[in-house]
Image: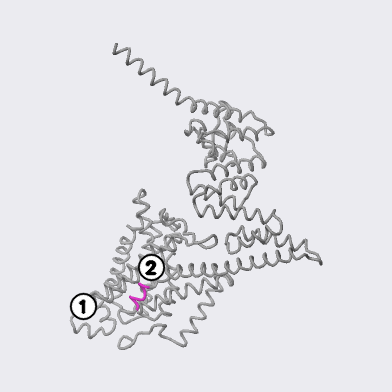
C-alpha cells in the first residue's frame, strides 16, 4: 500500500514538473527552429525572420542579434551549425557555438559562411536591440541604451521612449528620454512646438542637442526670405540664444578641462621636483641622476606586476613603498659612494651624477632591454568621473593629483615635526653650527639624499600610469624638474608646489592654441625673464639659510 502511494506521489510530482517546464521547452524548440532557418533564408526574407527571433523570450536573443549586426554570425558548412566567429592572429577563426555556448576548435575561413545582412537589416536590429535594452531591468543598461539613441535616434526608438518614459523611475534616464523626444519635436513639430522644445533644451550640454539646434538654425536660415514671418523671427532668435548659451557653457567647461589637465601635469612635476628641491636645498648638490631615480621607481612597478600578475589591482599599493625603498637605497649608495667625496665642488658633483645617470640607464637597458615596457593600470584607475556630458575627470589623473598632495603634505610634516626634519633644517641653515651641536651632518646628508631619491621613485610609480616605462623616462622630466625648483625657490617646498602647479597649468592653457613645442618655448622664455627679476625664485629662503 505504501509503495503504491509513493508511486502516485512521484507520478504527480513528475506531471507537475513536466507541466511547469513545458512552455520553456516549447519556446526553446521554437527558438532553435528559427535559428535553423538563418543559413538558408534569403536576404529579402531575412527581416521577418529577425523579427520573429527578437520576439523569442530566450536570454540569448540580444547576444545573437548583436553578433548578427556586427557581422560575426556564421555557420559551419559541414555541420550547418551556427557559430560566433572572430579572426585570430593565426589567420583562422575562433568559434563559439550559438546554441551550446561553448568554444569550438578554430577553423579557416573556407569552412565558414557568414549570415548575410545589409544596412536595412542592421538598422532593424539596432532598433530591436534599443527596445530590448530600454526595457531592461538594469538602470545601467537602460542608460547606455538611451545614450545610444540620443546619438542615433530611430523611429522605433522614439516610439519605445514615448511608451516607457511614463513608467521610468530613474531621474537621469527619464531626463535623457525627454531630451530625445524634444529633439524629435524640434525637428518635426510646428513653430510653437519648436519654440517650446527650445525653451526646454536651453541649458542642456549634450553635443547632440547642440547639433540639432545648429541644424535647425541652418535650415531656417536657408528658407528665410525678405518677408520673414514673426514666428520664424522668434524661432531664429530662440535658436541663436540657445546655441549661444551652449557655447558659453562649453567654453567654461573647456577652461575647467584645461585646468584639470594642467593641475594633473603640475602634480607630476611636483612629484618629480620635490625630491630634487630637498637635496638641492640641503646639500647644494645638482643631482643629474634624479631622473633615473624616477625611472627605477617606474621599473619597480613593472617588476611587481610581472612578479604578481594576479594582483594587478593591488600592484600600485605594493609598488609605492617598494619604489621608495629601491630608489632611496640607490640614492644612499650614490651619496655614500660618490657625493660625499665631492662636497663643496658643485661642478664635479654635477659631472659625477651625470655619469651615474648614464650608468643607470645602461644598466636598465642591459637588464630589461631598450624597449619600452607597458605597466597595466588597475581597474580602479580606469575610466572617468562624468560631471556632465562635456566635462569628465579621468580617474588616473585625479588619483595622481590626490597622491601628489598626500606626498607633499607628508613630506612637509616630516620636515616640520620630526627630529629628522629638525636636523635637516639645522644642517641646511648652518652646517658648522649643527655639527657643533652634535648633529652628524654626514648622515643627515645621506638620509636627505635617500629621502629625495625615494620620493623620486614614488614619482616614477605615478608616471608609469601616464606613459610607457623605458630607460629614457627620467630624461623627459629632469629639465622640467630643475625649472620648477628654480622658479619656486631652492629648498622651498611651498615654492615647489606653487611653481609646479603654475607651470603645469600655464603650459596646458597655451598648448591648444600654440602647440606643445611653442608653449614650452614661451614658458622657458617667461621663466628666464622672471629669474632676471627674482633670481631666488618665488619663495626665497630668508635669514641664515639664504646665505
Residue ID at (65%, 68%): 241
Q: Nearer the viewer, residue 71 or 106?
A: 71
Task: Find residue 45 and report its horizontal and vertical position in percent.
Answer: 67, 32
The percent position of residue 14, horizontal first and vertical second, equals 40, 20
Q: Quadrant of residue 3?
A: top left
Please, which residue is most extreme toward the left here?
438
Q: Which mark is residue 456?
A: none
Q: Main secondary structure of the magenta part?
A: helix
The residue at 50%/84% (across/down) is 529
Badge 2 crowding class, 10 Å Cα cut-off, few under 14, some 14 to 19, many 20 or more, is many
Which segment is the magenta one? 274-280
Q: Earlier in the sequence, mark 2 or mark 1?
A: 2
Query: Which residue is nearer to you in this view: 21 or 196?
Result: 196
Q: Looking at the image, do the residues carrying marks 2 and 1 touch, with CB atoms under 8 Å apart?
A: no
Quadrant for the C terminus, please. Answer: bottom left
x, y percent for residue 129: 57, 42
Check if residue 469 falls in the magenta segment. no
Side (left or right) of 267 relative to 452: right
Q: Quadrant of residue 369?
A: bottom left
| Residue sitting nearer the eye, 393 or 461 | 393
Give the side of residue 490 with respect to residue 417, left or right.
Answer: right
Task: Give the color scheme: rainbow, by chain, secondary structure or one colour.
Answer: one colour
Q: Residue furthest top?
A: 1
* Residue at horizontal 48 percent and vertical 81 percent from the top: 527
Q: Position of residue 118 (x, y in %)?
A: 66, 40
Q: Kindly identify which residue carries mark 2.
A: 404
Q: Is residue 279 magenta?
A: yes
* Residue 359 shows up from this direction: no
Nearest-to-viewer mark from 2 and 1 = 2
Per the image, the residue denoted by label 1 is 440
In the depicted view, which residue is nearer to us: 24 or 406?
A: 24
Amino acid at each position: 500500500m505504501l509503495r503504491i502511494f509513493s508511486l502516485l506521489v512521484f507520478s504527480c510530482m513528475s506531471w507537475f514538473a513536466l507541466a511547469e517546464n513545458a512552455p520553456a521547452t516549447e519556446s526553446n524548440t521554437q527558438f532553435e527552429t528559427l535559428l535553423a532557418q538563418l543559413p538558408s533564408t534569403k536576404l529579402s526574407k531575412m527581416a521577418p525572420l529577425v523579427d520573429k527571433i527578437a520576439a523569442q523570450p530566450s536570454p540569448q536573443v540580444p547576444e545573437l542579434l548583436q553578433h548578427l549586426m556586427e557581422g560575426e554570425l556564421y555557420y559551419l558548412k559541414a555541420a550547418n551549425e551556427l557559430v560566433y566567429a572572430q579572426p585570430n592572429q593565426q589567420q583562422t577563426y575562433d568559434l563559439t557555438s550559438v546554441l551550446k555556448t561553448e568554444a569550438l576548435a578554430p577553423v579557416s575561413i573556407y569552412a565558414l559562411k557568414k549570415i548575410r545582412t545589409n544596412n536595412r537589416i542592421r538598422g532593424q536590429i539596432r532598433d530591436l536591440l534599443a527596445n530590448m535594452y530600454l526595457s531592461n531591468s538594469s538602470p545601467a543598461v537602460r542608460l547606455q541604451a538611451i545614450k545610444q539613441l540620443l546619438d542615433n535616434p530611430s523611429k522605433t526608438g522614439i516610439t519605445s521612449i514615448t511608451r516607457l518614459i511614463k513608467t521610468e523611475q530613474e531621474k537621469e534616464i527619464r531626463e535623457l528620454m525627454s531630451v530625445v523626444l524634444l529633439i524629435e519635436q524640434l525637428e518635426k513639430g510646428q513653430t510653437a512646438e519648436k519654440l517650446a522644445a527650445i525653451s526646454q533644451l536651453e541649458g542642456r550640454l549634450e553635443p547632440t542637442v547642440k547639433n540639432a539646434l545648429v541644424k535647425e538654425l541652418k535650415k531656417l536660415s536657408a528658407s528665410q526670405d525678405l518677408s520673414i514671418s514673426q514666428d520664424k523671427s522668434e524661432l531664429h532668435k530662440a535658436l541663436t540664444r540657445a546655441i549661444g548659451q551652449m557655447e558659453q557653457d562649453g567654453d567654461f567647461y573647456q577652461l575647467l578641462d584645461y585646468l584639470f589637465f594642467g593641475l594633473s601635469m603640475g602634480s607630476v612635476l611636483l612629484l618629480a621636483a620635490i625630491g630634487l628641491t630637498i637635496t638641492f636645498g640641503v646639500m647644494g648638490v645638482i643631482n643629474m641622476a634624479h631622473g633615473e631615480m624616477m625611472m627605477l621607481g617606474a621599473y619597480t612597478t613593472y617588476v611587481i606586476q610581472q612578479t604578481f600578475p594576479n594582483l594587478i589591482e593591488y600592484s600600485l599599493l605594493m609598488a609605492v613603498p617598494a619604489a621608495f625603498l629601491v630608489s632611496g637605497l640607490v640614492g644612499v649608495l650614490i651619496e655614500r659612494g660618490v657625493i660625499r667625496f665631492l662636497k663643496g665642488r658643485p661642478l664635479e658633483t654635477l659631472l659625477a651624477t651625470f655619469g651615474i645617470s648614464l650608468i643607470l640607464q645602461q644598466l636598465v637597458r642591459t637588464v630589461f632591454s631598450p624597449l619600452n615596457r607597458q605597466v597595466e593600470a588597475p581597474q580602479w584607475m580606469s575610466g572617468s568621473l562624468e560631471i556632465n556630458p562635456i566635462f569628465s575627470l579621468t580617474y588616473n589623473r585625479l588619483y595622481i593629483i590626490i597622491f601628489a598632495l598626500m606626498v607633499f603634505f607628508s613630506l612637509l610634516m616630516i620636515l616640520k615635526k620630526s627630529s629628522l626634519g629638525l636636523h635637516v633644517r639645522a644642517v641646511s641653515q648652518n652646517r658648522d653650527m649643527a655639527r657643533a651641536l652634535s648633529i652628524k651632518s654626514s648622515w643627515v646628508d645621506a638620509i636627505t639624499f635617500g629621502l629625495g631619491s625615494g620620493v623620486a621613485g614614488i614619482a616614477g610609480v605615478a608616471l608609469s600610469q601616464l606613459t610607457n616605462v623605458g630607460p629614457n623616462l627620467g630624461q623627459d622630466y629632469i629639465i622640467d624638474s630643475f625649472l620648477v625648483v628654480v622658479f619656486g625657490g631652492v629648498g622651498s617646498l611651498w615654492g615647489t608646489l606653487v611653481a609646479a602647479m603654475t607651470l603645469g597649468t600655464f603650459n596646458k592653457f597655451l598648448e591648444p592654441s600654440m602647440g606643445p613645442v611653442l608653449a614650452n618655448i614661451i614658458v622657458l622664455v617667461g621663466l628666464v625673464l622672471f629669474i632676471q627679476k627674482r633670481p631666488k625664485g618665488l619663495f626665497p629662503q630668508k635669514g641664515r639659510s639664504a646665505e
